[in-house]
Amino acid sequence: MNKIFIKILKIKLRWLAKLIIWKFNPDIIAITGSVGKTSAKEAIYAVLKNKKRVRRTMGNLNNELGMPLTVLKDFSDEELKIVSRGYPAGKDKIKKTFFWLKVVVSAIIRVLNLRKSAYPQVLVLEYGADRPGDIKYLLEIAKPKIAVITAIGGTPVHIEFYENAQSVAKEKSKLLENLFTSNFAILNFDDEIAMGMKEKTRAKIMTFGFNEGAVVKIINFENKFDDKETTGVSFKLEYGGSFVPIFLKNVFGRSHAYAAAVGATVGIIYNMNIVEIAESLSSNYRPAKRRMNLIQGIKNTHIIDDSYNASPLSMQQAVETLRDLKTERKIAVLGDMLELGEHSREAHEEIGRLAAKSVDFLVTVGQNGKVIASAAEKAGLLKEKILSFGKAEEAIEPIKKIIKNKDLILIKASRGIGLDKIVDSLKI
């Protein structure tokens, strides 16, 4: 599709999405941050699912084309596949053109004919901020009543297009600046930059996190791995002096506890009690694919599939999770974290040093994967315990040769490195 078509399409989608929101007036819950957006979105959806008519962003549709799609219609995964970020840019141009034309025509029909009772009461939307100005553009389509900041971290994802972490925070804080006094801002209490944004808003502040002082506090967190039904994350949520236990099966990492806490905070805003919230999470929470999901691998191994994307903060959390799990041997397959600009080398070296203390065998993929490998070796991991490859496809057969019975294998990199191919080759 040429640039003129895209420009016209953006204008039409924005106009139609704004018209839909004006007509049906749903509550908008906006989520932004450097990590954890998708898991938080799924947790909010899980909590509200039985209480409201709710729709959330599907897949990775959080930009100027994708976000309006969620507003316009609840498309199927198959329909969205052709316009997702992972789909080849130059492939099926005619098919893509007809899809967008169908979207526009069907949206006009829905504006004219759809009853208010048939439209969602709540839209849970991701607001991507790859470049300066992205949040402002999305706010012109949909202004939230509840805004969530998941985490920013010291070296945020997509920082390549910003001067520094503070510039990223400034862009994302625009989400809070547009809130009214009757609205809510939900902030990660454990993230210094996120908490610094509270000065940017007039809205009521709610916080979540592990540290003392969070309104919704996570306590007694544990990653459990024992090859039985109890494999997953276990923790309690505390709010207003009440405690509820939460167990999420076949996922690992604090990121899922953070997501559950975000969902709980939204539930509290909607006047749900903490027990009702816990029951909704247990029944309805479905972790997004390729985000710290535990799956069965060949040779009686287990794979932690976190191949969807990577930032310095999420990579650190994933490697630390692997370090803390109790098992005979741990292997990490790590690749490049993209769009870090001048911060790239330092961020990859830090992950290499952390991996040296956390794994028994390290496999790296990509140009910056070699930086991870070099830093791990300098930090004490034996050279014979490290393999490096330029592309994911090159690593598949060597990995199959080194893995052994009951190995636990973490696989993580930015989506563009394609480590999902390695996951798919190793899973049963």
Image: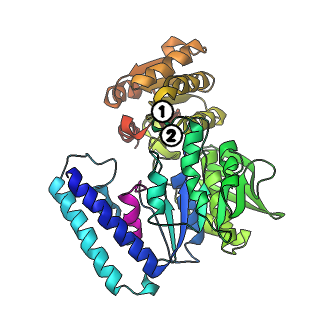
Q: Give the residue at mark 2.
A: 157
Give the residue at mark 1: 340
Q: How many marks?
A: 2
- Sequence-wise, which precedes: disc 1 or disc 2? 2
Q: Secondary structure at mark 2?
A: loop
Q: Is residue 336 or residue 162 the one in the foreground? A: 162
Residue 337 vs residue 136, the one in the foreground? 136
Give the image location of residue 384, x and y in percent: 49, 13
Q: Please determine whether, in this image, residue 138 is positioned above or below residue 341.
A: below
The residue segment tinted magenta is: 59-71
Task: Identify the residue shown where x is 18% and y is 52%.
Answer: 92
Q: Amino acid at mark 1?
A: Leu
Q: Position of residue 41 (x, y in %)?
A: 53, 59
Task: Check disc 2 and give the amino acid type.
Answer: Val
The quadrant of the rendering that contains the C terminus is top left
Residues tagged 1 and 2 counted as in contact (Cβ below 8 A): yes
Whether residue 415 is visible to the viewer of this picture, yes or no, is: yes
**Residue 101 part of the magenta segment:** no
